[in-house]
Image: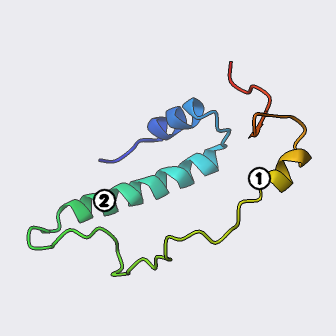
Amino acid sequence: MALTHDDVCRVARLARLRQDEAQAQSMLTELNRIFALMEQMQGVDTTLVEPMSHPRDVAQRLRADRVTESDRREQLLPLAPKSENGLYLVPKVIE
């Protein structure tokens, strides 16, 4: 699939991009190269290639699921601008 000069100008107009003739021609060349590479990649036989969940075989390092902080609610609650029944009161953001 090859793009035309008109296609590039139309997409630029829809994206509200201002470009001169040289930029449009450069973009046309670059986009056609990208599409040519995509077509070339579509032709590669991948039937024997096993899908990967991640491009690298990495193991996620997990920390132990344990409490590391003490409960400081009674110390921090008085610092809040507004609180009620042990809860922080915040301004309504979504109506």
Measure how far apart labels 1 and 2 are at the Cα level: 57 Å
Query: Disc 1 vs disc 2: which is toward the camera?
Result: 1
- Taking 32 as reference, is 12 above or below it? above
Q: What residue did someone put label 1 on?
A: 73
Between 86 and 34, the one nearer to me in the picture: 86
| Label 1: element kind | helix
Q: Amino acid at mark 1?
A: Arg
In the rendered image, the vertical position of residue 68 relative to residue 39, given as above or below: below
Residue at the image point whose x is 38% and y is 81% from the top: 58
Task: Report the residue at 41% width, 41% height from top.
Answer: 4
Q: Which mark is residue 11?
A: none
Residue 27 versus residue 57 in the image, above or below:
above
When asked about the image quadrant of residue 67, the answer is: bottom right
Q: Secondary structure at mark 2?
A: helix
> Hey, which quadrant is residue 7 in on the image?
top left
x then y, percent, for residue 2: 34, 47
Q: Nearer the viewer, residue 10 or 85?
A: 85
Q: Nearer the viewer, residue 23 or 75?
A: 75
Q: Earlier in the sequence, mark 1 or mark 2?
A: 2
> Dot 1, crowdedness within 10 Å: few (<14), some or many (≥20)?
few
Pointer 2 local density, CA inside 10 Å: few below 14, some 14–19, many at least 20: few
Q: How is the image coloured?
A: rainbow
Residue type highlighted by circle 2: Met
Quick one: which residue is furthest to the left in this view? 48
Q: In the image, residue 48 lies at what x, y percent?
A: 9, 73
Callout count: 2
Relative to 91, residue 21 above or below: below
Q: Which mark is residue 38?
A: 2
